[in-house]
Image (cartoon, rainbow, N blue to C red):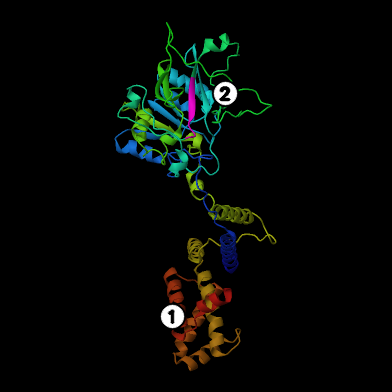
Amino acid sequence: MKSRLLILLSIVLMVAVLAALNAASYVRVEEEAETELLPDRSTENSGGTGTRALFEYLRQRGVEAVRWGEPFEALAGAEAPESLVLVGPLRRELEMREADELRGWVARGGRLVIIDRAPSPMLLPSAGEHWRIHSEAAELPTADSFPGDVENMTRGVPLLSPAQPTALTRNVVEVTRSRFAARLHVYPAEADTAEGRAEPPPGAEPEAQAPAPAGGEDPWGEDEGPPPPAPVRPQEGPGMSAPVVHVPFGRDGTGALLLDYSYGRGRVVILSDPYLVSNAGIFRADNLFLATNVVTGGSRGRVAFDEFHHGYGEARNRLFAYFRGTPILWMFAQGALVALALVWTRGRRFARAIPAPRPDRRSKLEFVSSMAELQQRARAYDLAVENIYQQTRRALARYAGLPAAAPLAELAERVAARSGRDRARLEALLRECEDAAAGAPLRPRRAVALARELRELERDLRLLMRSREIRQAR
């Protein structure tokens, strides 16, 4: 027991030492401020680049807004939402099979909302056979582009009005985009072939075109060629249904900030500036109304925000994510290591093999009862009396201070002299027991009476033979 207690105390001490070392060596890492260069567009993020404010606002308005934490393969199930919102950039790489599942879901009647400055080509289904959609980055964010700095985010950007009254621009008068918003261009597919250019693949992103600076200086340098020609603005013709531009990119009407188009039985909505739905920009102008209309489409259907590709899917352990960056995870790992070591050592022998103790399951009363039953069946009453008498005689000899083989008369005289008992009666009892042990006829009742008188003699003289035998056996 002491050895086990020592082992247990040693383990507890070792765990305490490991925890103290972890706590002493832990250095708290200050959280870096969120920037538009490395944003976190998750609805779990309450920072400037997150979308938690929009998510909570939709819930308060009674919209069934949920966080989608499963791969796109689950869109084929019965729990598929009416609208799926993808706010980029995504933190988990999108696979081709997921893009195929997503496009199939849209073609079956789903509504896909893409809010990103550079939508992935795999997430951008082609707008029919005659149209192509591309995004053009006007200005790229830097490491000091903080979303909370309104002056920096919206410097030189005019307020934009909807191009036409639609379900996506309801209650919207003006919106404020950031200067990092992308310009969406809609190309007729035939125009690329007519101008001698190879048709880009569906969803391909062209090179960014920077606006020419004032003063007439050449922005391209001596070794660089001119920028590609401006895209042709789409015009509808017979049998051609062009994407609908809801909010233009600028006041000149070139490009679009928000557009949508049909794909199969569903629709695809593209908003090229996540700043409008982020926590830092949603309260500017009528951005909140526009974000609500874009996400819900003016209906009360179920809206799901994709969290699986932001790293918050069902496969991720929320407990580990909560303790990430703290020494708690290392403490768990070390505790598990100690537990494994304990389990491993319990199955190994560190000394010579010792047989397991085998307790005697036989009761002494059971032995006595068995012997009594055997003697009773054999009518060996003399043997029963002899067993008791021999022990009593040895005890009387020690009581009288005589050897065990002392004459019966002398033994009775000495015991009577010391105890004050009747010498003749004591000698008669001992002599009758001697005769019974020698084979004299004995009845059962007399045998029981002799055994009773011997036990009473032991009790009166306090010989305590049984106590002594028990001590000797121990």
Image x and y of residue 363, in percent: 50, 64
Which quadrant of the rendered structure holds the C terminus? bottom right
Residue 172 versus residue 25 in the image, above or below: above
Circle 1 residues within 10 Å: few <14, some 14–19, many ≥20: few
Image x and y of residue 229, in percent: 56, 18
Residue 268 visible in the displayed image = no
The answer to which of 427 and 26 lies nearer the viewer is 26
Residue bounds of the magenta highlight: 179-185
Circle 2 residues within 10 Å: few <14, some 14–19, many ≥20: few
Marking on residue 380: none
Q: Residue furthest top?
A: 238
In primary-sequence order, the first of circles 1 and 2 is 2
Residue 351 versus residue 460 in the image, above or below: above
Which quadrant of the rendered structure holds the N terminus? bottom right
The answer to which of 150 and 358 lies nearer the viewer is 150
Q: Which residue is mark 2?
A: 206
Could you give the CA–CA distance between mark 1 and mark 2, rounded to whole angstroms?
Answer: 118 Å
Q: Residue furthest front?
A: 215
The amino acid type of the residue labelled 1 equals: Glu
The answer to which of 94 and 362 lies nearer the viewer is 94
SS type, badge 2: loop
Residue 44 versus residue 328 in the image, above or below: above
Image x and y of residue 289, in percent: 33, 32
Q: Give residue 157's quadrant in the image.
A: top left
Q: Nearer the viewer, mark 1 or mark 2?
A: 2
Q: Which residue is mark 1?
A: 456
Residue 180 inside the magenta-drawn segment:
yes
Image x and y of residue 343, in percent: 60, 54
Residue at x 48% of width, y 32% of height: 181
The answer to which of 202 and 310 lies nearer the viewer is 202
The amino acid type of the residue labelled 2 equals: Pro
> Number of callouts in the render?
2
